[in-house]
Image (cartoon, grey):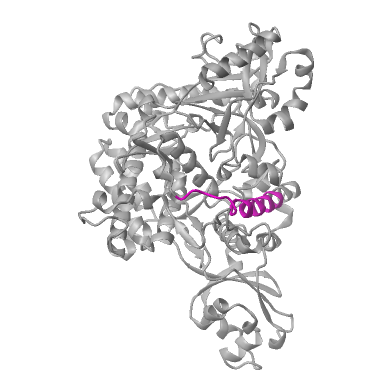
Amino acid sequence: MHTLFPVQNSAKNSHLDANPELDVEAVQWSLINHLVECFLLEQWVDEHLIQVTTIHEYLANHKTSQAQDAHQFLASLLLASLPQQYQDFFDQDNSLMVMQVSQNRQLLLLVEPAYASPWRLSKSCLPVIHNLNSKRHVDSALLEPVGSPQQLLDMFLSMMDSATLSDVGVLKLKESLKASFIAQQQSAAANITTTVCQHPHWHQTLIAAEQWASLMDRPFHPLAKGKLGFTAQEYKRYMAEFNQPITLVWVAIAKSHVMVAEHVQDTTTQNPAKYLLDTTQQQSLMRELDDKGIAETHIAMPVHPWQMTHVIDDMYAEDLTNGTVVALKFDTLITYASSSMRSMLIDADTPNSIKLPIGVYALNSKRYLPALKLINGEKNQAILMQARTLDPELSAQLRLWDERLWWGYMLPSHLHDKSAINPYFYQEKPTHLGAMLRQLPADLCDDTIQLLPMASLGMLVYKQGVSHHIFDGIAQEGIHSTSQNSFQEGSPKNKKLAVIACFKSLCDMFLGTMLRCLRLGFAPEMHGQNIVIVLKDNRFTSLLLRDHDSVRIYPPWLARHKIADPEYLSPPGFKNRLYRETPKALIFYLQSLGLLVNLRAIIESLVEHYHINEETLWHEAMTSIEESLVTIDFDDDQRQILRDGLLNSSHYPHKTLLLPVIGRGSDPHGSMPAGESKTINPFKRVKNSG
């Protein structure tokens, strides 16, 4: 059986470098599985080219006078030359999806019903190509498994009208898929700790959990692991799963060229060094600034080492020559990458961390740090802070990383222009040199607390073929069930009950909090990298949000609670997409990112690790929504809209991922390309089976 997750090897016993095929099959199947899902849900081709049937029906339709029964026909396909799982598959009357690739070729997919889509690839086999010659001579027919994700992508593209495809976009898609395939194999060799929650200090737990979260990056996105711009060596140096210390480099920028956040009143006391460095480090940095005679005129700024080498040295060459930007020798701040790659964590008891620009393509967008988004993030944090005062439950359950301090390069002529018509908000150069500070609430910097990105809960780590899940250290019998047995010593049934109870508790916290946000008229970023679950005494106590620039709003619902229009900045002539025109458009984020990405990844990891019935977990999530719709003080129209959208509708909107990459082509952009299609409501099968 294949696994949804890259198979990990401990560094001590890993032979990946010498024998890379050890993990290739698992990575290959995972990528192919996600490609198939995107192909189907994004409707790359007309439905008439795809047929869902069964093995028996398919064999019956392909028998000829030369092969009067199925056994003869199967023999003619040279099935015996394939691995045993393929022979077992054809021996049973499984569901089969048949895609007509060309007149002489069909693609056969072993599929099973799914929850987040109508069908998904079964974990026993790769897709199979059925080659047919034009004369349909049975003895020349042949079955062969798809050899790679790249081969499958070529096949899918060949089924499309080439006139509708951007050549540049297709090349970008292929480049990203190849990079993701290589990167996943590298990540499979990372030596990941399996005892995340056993670290003595809260900051150690967070860094360890970010390693887990980084392993799949954005779940179900075939291109997520491909970071275009990193060499293989840089990938292993800068990605979180490899747990490598990253020493930030520093530059000094003339104050005449630094735009700052509204909350930065005095750059002498409010600058990155004051928040990130200890006293000794600050003194060392100040000595260098004094020696260079720029202590009063410049602000010291951390820079990611990749960014310095690959972007700053070239893009800011003139500034480095004329002294506007001064490269410094100071290099004593050691950080660790988070799962988002550009958010850097400090392994110390400090509430402060830093987000930096890195000019690498990830999800086919450059990881800029544009001032316009930082300003909109300030506006959104104001909404989040006000919301916490309007709902006592939100005040307790919704915690915020403070993101209101930032510094960024800007030309002097536009330094104080924070209007949407500042032309340099839309230029690339200013987005590559800057920093945003993140500050944790002080009470969360406590060793009795574990901070876990939700993405880390949707991941398994394998060591010597044995899987591990973060729930192993959380879902203890004595806490989550009435049994007195420990989680480790309990029966398999009790372990499953404990995990199910733990998952229900997670759903209550996550879905209940997000529904309270929707009631007030906004939707935070809901995928698992942005939401950190707070664990105290093995209880999920709150959610911690980061990346506030991605909060979406529906103004009429905001107005009901006297939350003012934030008046987002956007390019002249464009409506900022943070505004949503209908409640349905706002609920989209809970449906797509909240349920179909974040919770789905957690469900699938629990199913694979604990062998829990998948329907049981989707049922728990559905129950959480039903209970929240009763207990939260929604207006009547809101409650009905949410019930219809989340529970009663037959379909959910689905974020398209790959076709938009083709559509964008080579256009550099700061956000991932995405569109919208539809899939089935994941609770539909739950209700039907009930």
Residue 500 against residue 232 in the figure, above or below:
below
Dividing the image into 4 quarters, which one contains the C terminus?
Answer: bottom left
Residue 414 in sight from this viewpoint = no
The one nearer the camera, 321 or 362, is 321
The one nearer the camera, 78 or 253, is 253
Q: Is residue 230 left or right of residue 476?
A: right
The one nearer the camera, 647 or 232, is 232
Residue at point 58%, 38% (across, down): 341
Q: Is residue 328 left or right of residue 645?
A: right
Residue at point 59%, 68% (across, down): 126
Splitting the image into 4 quarters, where does residue 541 fall?
top left
Splitting the image into 4 quarters, where does residue 100 fall?
bottom right
Residue 427 in sight from this viewpoint = yes
Q: Is residue 186 magenta?
A: yes
**Magenta span:** 174-194
Numbered marks: total = 0
Where residue 531 appears, as percent x and y from the top left, is: 43, 38
Where residue 284 appears, as percent x and y from the top left, is: 61, 16
Where residue 635 appears, as percent x and y from the top left, is: 27, 35
Q: Is residue 267 left or right of residue 481?
A: right
Main SS of the magenta part reads helix
Residue at point 35%, 32% (across, down): 398
Where residue 506 appears, as percent x and y from the top left, is: 34, 46
Q: Is residue 249 magenta?
A: no
Q: Is residue 234 left or right of residue 506?
A: right
Residue 50 against residue 415 in the figure, above or below:
below
